[in-house]
Amino acid sequence: MSDSTERIKTMIIGSGPAGYTAAIYAARADMKPVMYTGMEPGGQLTTTTEVDNFPGYPQGIDGPTMMVQLQEQAERFGTEVRIGRATAVELSDEVGGIHKITIDDDKVVEAETVIISTGASAKYLNIPSEQRLRGGGVSACAVCDGFFYKGQDVAIVGAGDTAAEEASYLANICNKVTMLVRKDYMRASKAMQHRVSNLANVEIRYDSEVDEVLGDQVVEGLRIVNNQTGEKDEIAITGLFIAIGHKPNTDIFKGQLDMDETGYIITEPKSTKTKKPGVFASGDAQDKIYRQAVTAAGTGCMAALDAERYLATIEAAPEEVV
């Protein structure tokens, strides 16, 4: 490890809507934030072709362009955006303590405050045809992208509450929804199962998996295999939604921050504060319910404001003692 160590006031780990919004607010508050972008600069929205539901874009905007604009806005106020990945952290338990973050297994940066905005990664089936058509009809967010398939036939993969909720959402706007369940039962709650099974335009196919996504540039169909009989058949669809879960990108914080059973960071109610003084979590790293760009941006704002107030308290402490 390099001996080079740097001391800063505020570090932002991650560069999606939460991170950039935190950066904008922190920079305007003269907190001199330094952002490390992580392995996927811009976060999940860089893989989204159209963002149609973020306020302020009446004609919509493509995800990569939106992230570039957010970065430019953050940099305009003085945020230093660096390419790099946090590979280890040592978070202080003390109020006013210094947190140590290792970047790319080499450089150690010391920060008075840390804003975590590392996001979460959608789980995919990881078959070649699915990966090739991501952004061309394959999506991991029905609420984000379902509108583009209004009146069309689509399919959704998954068996839990999220899959059932997204199937219900799609059923309201699409012509037909084929739901593929890998086992002979659903994991969703009974209430969600009843809701889906009562929708006339939803067909639930049990013991079914995706064999191949059909289409050259965009999704044109789906080859389905029955995993009990081996029988295959094809259906015509224009959109495929994967709803088999998300994994928060929080592994480096395990053992230091409180997390739920799936790795989402637990924060204080109505706050972005973690159990470590001066460490705040925002966006999909701590939100497993909404997972939208606009809600991530909102918690990024909250994290910056929480960090600003924390720093103000620390800086005022010596005067109060006197």
Image (spheres, rainbow, N blue to C red):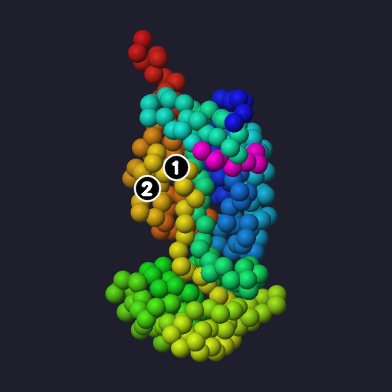
| Residue 243 inside the magenta-drawn segment | no
Crowd around label 1: few <14 · some 14–19 · many ≥20 (10 Å): some
Rendering coords of residue 252 (x, y %): 48, 43
User: Which residue type carries mark 2?
Assistant: Met
User: Count the marks: how many?
Assistant: 2
Query: Do we see residue 253 in this rendering?
Result: yes
In the image, which residues are magenta?
82-88
Residue 175 visible, this orientation: no
Few, some or many residues within 10 Å of mark 2 (<14, 14–19, 20+)? some
Residue at 35%, 79% (x, y): give it: 185
Determine the residue positioned at 51% across, 38% down.
88
* Image quadrant in which the C terminus is located: top left
Mark before the other along the chain sequence, 2 or 1: 1
Residue 253's tag is 1
Q: Which residue is mark 2?
A: 259
Q: Of the residues shown, which amino acid type is indicated by label 1? A: Phe
